[in-house]
Amino acid sequence: MPLIVLDRDGVINEDSEDYIRGLADWHPIPGSIEAMAALSRAGYSLAIATNQSGLSRGYFGLDELEAIHGELCRQVEALGGQVAGIFYCPHLPDAGCSCRKPGTGLLQAMEAELGESPRGAFFIGDSLKDLQAARAFGCRPVLVRSGKGELTEQLLQAVDPGVESPADIPVYADLAAAARAILAREPAPKHDI
């Protein structure tokens, strides 16, 4: 199945400057869970790539992170969809790891674990780091205005900081709008029988 890569905070759920520290802080953006389920039901494999430095900062532990991801998956499954995998970087920004976006380590891990390459896949994000990681790995970047997206769009209009051809990056209000556009424009994926 063709892959779609999604950022988490600001794309699937509301973002917070204080970090999403537990299930009580996790609030899906209206329409995002439905959009994920619709993409999955249409034959796309969904993978999430998210920076989660709150782990290293001690703001939350693995149990809290897994509870959030478990609830996210349950909500998508309740609507007939499925999340193929959730890949996260726990490191601080200055750790020098390859997995923290804009690095491509999460995409490499996705490719190894899922057996399907994100190269050429849509990568839907709200930050410059998402777009840079997408470009660096050969994904098709898509920007949403939710989360940090409006600020990112302004940055792209002002200057091109490391993202080639920002004018050709499609921009949508949110994940629901991006999913509608993908489903309307892309031919339905072929399924193996």
Image (cartoon, helix red, strand yellow):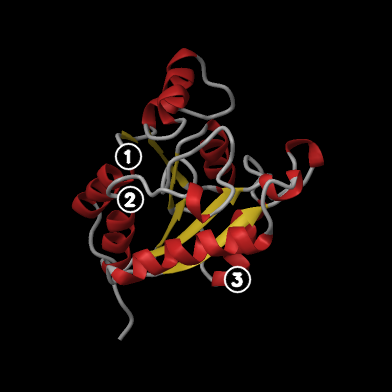
Q: Which mark is residue 113?
A: 3
Residue contact at pointers 1 and 2, CB within 8 angstroms: yes
Assign a secondary structure to mark 3: helix
Q: Nearer the viewer, mark 3 or mark 1?
A: 1
Q: Amino acid at mark 1?
A: Asp
Residue type, label 3:
Glu
Q: Which mark is residue 101?
A: none
- Residue at image mark 1: 174
Earlier residue among tags 1 and 2: 2
**Callout 2–callout 3 Cβ contact below 8 Å:** no
Query: Which residue is at 27% across, 57% downward?
Result: 34
Q: Which residue is mark 2?
A: 32
Pinpoint residue 33: horizontal percent, then vertical percent.
33, 56
Residue 31 % position (x, y): 27, 49
Position of 44 relative to 146 (above/below)? below
Residue found 53% across the figure and 47% down from its top: 138
Query: How far apart in space, not on screen, are marks 3 and 1 (Cα)?
Result: 28 Å
Q: Nearer the viewer, residue 150 or 65?
A: 65
Q: In the displayed image of the protein, which residue is found farthest to the top?
A: 158
